[in-house]
Image: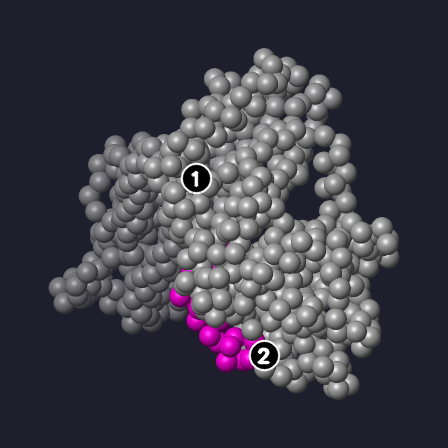
Amino acid sequence: MHAKDENRIGKFDLAIPVLLWLFLIICCLSFLIYRIQKNEKENNDYYYSSARQNQFTVKSRIEGDIHLLQTIAAGFRGMDSDHARQLPEIINRMNFSMEGMKIEYSEKLDWSRLDREDSYFNVLIIGKNNQPLGYLYTGNARDLLKQILNTQTLAGDGICAVFDNRGCLVASAGDRDAADWNNIKNKIYDMITNNQQTSSELNFLENNHELAVLIPLDYNDWYLLNVFSESGLQDRYMETAVGLGIMILISSSLFFVFFYKQYRTIAANQKTLVNIAYTDSLTRSRNFHSFKKEAERILRTADLKSCAVWYCDIKKFKFINDVLGYEEGDRILIEIAGLLQKCSGQNSLFCRVSADNFVGLYQYETRVELKNCFQKLIEEFRLKELSYNKRIATELCMGVYFLEEEDRNVSIDTIVNRANIAQKYIKNLPGNQFGIFNKEMWDKVVEESELEAEMEGAIERQEFRIFIQPKVSIQMNDEIVGGEVLVRWENPRKGTILPGQFIPIMERDEKIIMLDRYMFERSCQWFHQYLKSGSKPINLAVNVSKVGLLRDDFVDYYGSIKEKYEIPDGLLELEFTETVMLTDDIVFNSLVARLHEKGFICSLDDFGAGYSSLNLLKNLSIDIVKLDIMFFRKSSDIRRERIVISNIIHMAKELQIKTIAEGVEYTETVEFLKTAGCNIVQGYVFARPMPVESFEKLLKETLILVPQDAYKAVNT
């Protein structure tokens, strides 16, 4: 193909899965970041709550120790100075029995001698007459405070310490190097000064993220510092984050491996898919879509005056399929495609449109080249077919449209349609045909299109009228014994239209079935009234199309109409063309048997006009054979013609098949047929087709018709 974009994978199509993957990754990362931020806030809230709990616990313990000193001091209340001299001994005995707190006594607190931070628990003893007797204080206050701090929440993982309002360390949990506290003294002082409660800049442990929470202890202007290591609480979260990251990594790797394999598979299959999309599955030639794209490309730059589009099909191809089978039909199509490929020039192309229809673009130097190419195609095809099929002569029909410069902006569909019009115009002509599109063809197509648009409505409006051509028994003194029902279209716009103008159109889209059934019922309706009036019974023949015969409900429908109008058995005759009978002998004989059961007479119409053979007389259980005399008159030797006709009549008689000669125009032909033993004659020599009213009047006025040469009848 010349359109490169048809041969490669669209970038947008490939980008879609990548974009979806990126979207998934972005969503995962966004969720991870959200969880990190949320976890950090939850951790901060949790740490601050723990610090408040530690503050409450430490403060309660300090107040408890002070309360204990106050209780002991209250026990010494009212003691006189003489007994006060026994206090040191009493307190020593108390310390011996107490655990934890070490109580000291001093008449006065000498801070030059005592460590203020180590003696913060002190209570005044009030003696007799409210006289101060001294102080009780803790001798191991710092140790007690450390014990308290060591028992606080998260103290095992973090740090719990007390600082005064100058940033000096009072006590801390565990053993810490003084240098550690001195390094952060200024930061603690800044936090106290700025009333800052939290900080993440204090690092007591290397390579470990820590959060510092500083809360007033509401005692002695002290502050409780809680330093928490976040690693403990983040372990579970980090496991989740790492797991999610690993999953993203694995899924991404699997995605790219899969995507790469898919890309290679798609790339490998793309050419095949394009082939399928642009190749005819049967002939392996281009299909119509591919042809149009390539033809449009060529016609954009080519000299249109040297280009032609042709449309070719095989005559009666459906008949070939029915008679020889679809496998044989497919073989013929493949042969045609091969020959067209061989005949096409370097700058030409063709395709199979559908069924047996082929279309092509041909670039020529002279117009006669294309006709010569068609003749060559016919000759080579005939040579190939002789070795395969000897039963049916296969004929081709080609319509051509030669382009002009004004067609530059015309669509390829329109151009192909013009070639198709030329092909349809000549298709009904005998033999292989080659036709060139012209205005006459176009006008005819327009006229047919107008008729086709009016047909269905015409049936509903009953514009189709019954005409009957009498059938005369030449063996019974030229008596009228029946008639054949024919149709005329009384069109309000065009007047009377003959069957040859509208029947082929109706056969194309199977509207002929509607017309068949309409005409049959109208005929039965008239026939019922005719017989009911007491008139002499006659034979009435009605034509049946091939497509109507092949309908599953054919026998039931025609039988029901016959019964509806109470037509006696043996009076209604159904005429079939030989192409119907060639489809399948067994099936057709079964159909005829069913029609006989319904009381119908069956006749073979136009015998000798097509590909009929004497085998038909032998194999088919028909009642009547209608000979097309006009076909026989094409011969140059009348003697030989009459020998053939006489023998056909003789064989039919021996097979108990009646014979009717139609298309008879001369009295001498009537005499010959009478001598040959033909039963009935139908033709202009006796009467032309006439409206049903005229036929009924004719039957009432006379039963005998005198033969008269057709041209004499016209002149008189």
Q: Is residue 483 left or right of residue 628?
A: right
- Number of labels in the image equals 2
Image point 28% across, 59% down: which residue?
Answer: 136
Q: Nearer the viewer, residue 527 or 239?
A: 527
Q: Residue furthest top?
A: 365
Residue 646 or 364: which is nearer the viewer? 646
Is the residue marked by circle 1 packed among few (<14), some (14-19), or many (20+) residues within 10 Å? many
Residue placed most toward the observer, 216 or 581: 581
| Residue labelled with disc 2 | 570
Q: Are marks 2 and 1 in contact (CB under 8 Å)?
A: no
Front: mark 2 or 1? 2
Q: Within 10 Å of the Cα at label 2, are there few (<14), some (14-19), or many (20+) other Cα atoms? A: some
What residue sits right under mark 1 in the picture? Answer: 333
Question: Which range of residues does the magenta coloring cover?
Answer: 579-600
Q: Main secondary structure of the magenta part?
A: helix
Q: Is residue 470 above or below residue 178?
A: below
Which quadrant would residue 466 be assigned to in this image? bottom right
| 329 is higher (above) or lower (below) than 583 | above
Alpha-carbon span between mark 2 and mark 1 = 45 Å
> Is residue 598 one of those drawn in magenta?
yes
Color scheme of the displayed model: one colour
Residue 657, given in percent of the width and then of the height, sits at 50, 68
Please indicate, yes or no, whether residue 318 appears anywhere in the rendered image.
no
Q: Position of residue 110 (x, y in %)?
A: 30, 46
